[in-house]
Image (cartoon, rainbow, N blue to C red):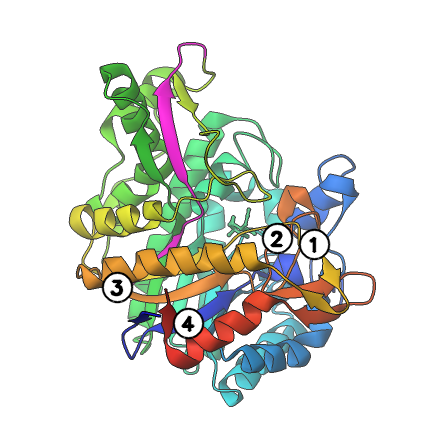
Amino acid sequence: MTKLQFPLDFVWGSATSSYQIEGAYDEDGKGESIWDIFSHTLGKINNNDTGDVACDHYHRYKEDIELMKEIGLDSYRFSISWPRILPNGKGEINQKGLNFYKELVDQLLEAGIEPVITLYHWDLPQALQEEGGWANRDTIKYFVKYAEVLFDELGAKVSQWITHNEPWVVSFLGYAEGEHAPGIKDRKQALQVAHNLLVSHGLVVKKFRELDLTGDIGITLNLTSVYSYSETDKDQEAAQLMEEYINGWFLDPVFKGSYPKKLAQIYENQFGKIDIQAGDMDLISQEIDFLGINYYSRALINYNPNSKFYGIESIKPAESDYTAMNWEIYPDGLYDLLTKLNQEYTNKPLYITENGAAFDDQIIAGQVNDQRRINYLKEHFKSVYRAIQDGVPVRGYYVWSLMDNFEWAYGYSKRFGLIYVDYNTQKRTLKDSAYWYQQVIEENSIGI
Ligand SMILES: N#[N+]C[C@@H]1[C@@H](O)[C@H](O)[C@@H](O)[C@@H]2O[C@H]12
């Protein structure tokens, strides 16, 4: 068996987010988030599931850290619930909420696991949504203040910070498609939200620098490798527009200081100008220390004049393999994405801040044989290895997810975890993939 040896300092981790695992949605002074409201609205979530209890991580974090140690994680990426820190999004700090995260960080460090904090993973305080949420530019200053509270409290112990997780999803599923909280269907408002999220990213990076903190700060974007279904001009134009929509809309402002021209013109013709203030683009594109990449699949695009979105249609090849999310399994897309990012956008370190798959895991006699997840991860690790060999500065990889959890609109119907969670008993069981990952981490290599 050939072993693909990763760099000695390569970071093997796993990721979660606050609303998806913590539960304790109304405990110890936590305020409501937009996801508490959305999940409590009948019909929004599969089976009307909510994050009220989730994986009860708020009470079981010590047990969960022991499981991270058993797997051998170098690092753990998690997000902080803004309304647990500032119940109204601004104003008085909830000390019990802050204490939870201080203890979590201390316990992780004691376990030899590097904490990576995502400041915003979608759970906006409902009180701010009632003032317009991210569509209201005032939310930006409240986000900066929230970040400053955490920098002050944890900045000396946490060396890697992520401002936003997937602002594309926040903007376009939350404010255009209405599939995510706050469930708004207004594409012009979504464009303003996208811009305000980017400005908030820039101002938090600026605050981080002003505080002269020793760590690194970056942003995590959901990125997809986009391919044209054919060589025809129409298909290639449709693919290029998809590239601007799914990747460029956030990559270009952050690394080039401007929005992708073709799509920006389409939007302006359709919706008029959004509120972009003097200095915004410079703020957004100030230097960051790394880029976080959430990669799950590719997009194979052809032109369809009947498509509801600017002639863009996604093709799903019948011969491909798919996950339980009906996402095509396409590991080469990760290699293509990493090389494209390094060639066209940045020489900064890259982290795979999320990659993983949902499969219909079954627990039988206390074991979960999730060979398909092992195969999925191995193939994507190979793509990362190839990119590193080609000189792309990929520094780490976080499997999504540490444990099965609340999968947003899908509720608990999709299992992405390395750890199986029985939601009736909260019993955790390491899946075969967790034991396989344990060996990968121990050997810092994959066998092929
Ligand atoms: N869906 N799906 C799985 C996973 C989701 O659970 C994460 O919260 C997001 O950051 C990203 O969408 C990816």
Q: Quadrant of residue 205?
A: bottom left
Q: Which residue type carries mark 3?
A: Pro
User: Pointer 2: what residue?
Assistant: 125
Sooner in the amino-acid sequence: mark 1 or mark 2 = 1
Q: Quadrant of the N terminus?
A: bottom left
Sequence-earlier tag: 3 or 2: 2
Instruction: Count the numbered circles shown.
Output: 4
Residue at the image point whose x is 46% and y is 36% from the top: 320
Q: Position of residue 359 (x, y in %)?
A: 61, 50
In the rendered image, is residue 22 in sight? no
Distance from label 3 to label 2 (Cα)? 32 Å
Marks 4 and 1, the one that precedes in the sequence: 4
Residue 320 is a magenta residue: no
Q: Is residue 238 left or right of residue 257?
A: right
Residue visible at 76% across and 66% down in the picture: 27
Label 4 vs label 3, nearer the camera: 4
The answer to whether any part of residue 40 appears in the image is yes
Q: Which circle marks residue 32 in the picture?
A: 1
Q: Position of residue 183 (x, y in %)?
A: 62, 35
Could you tell me how far apart the alpha carbons at marks 4 and 3 are, in whole angstroms? 15 Å
> Circles 4 and 1: CB distance less than 8 Å?
no
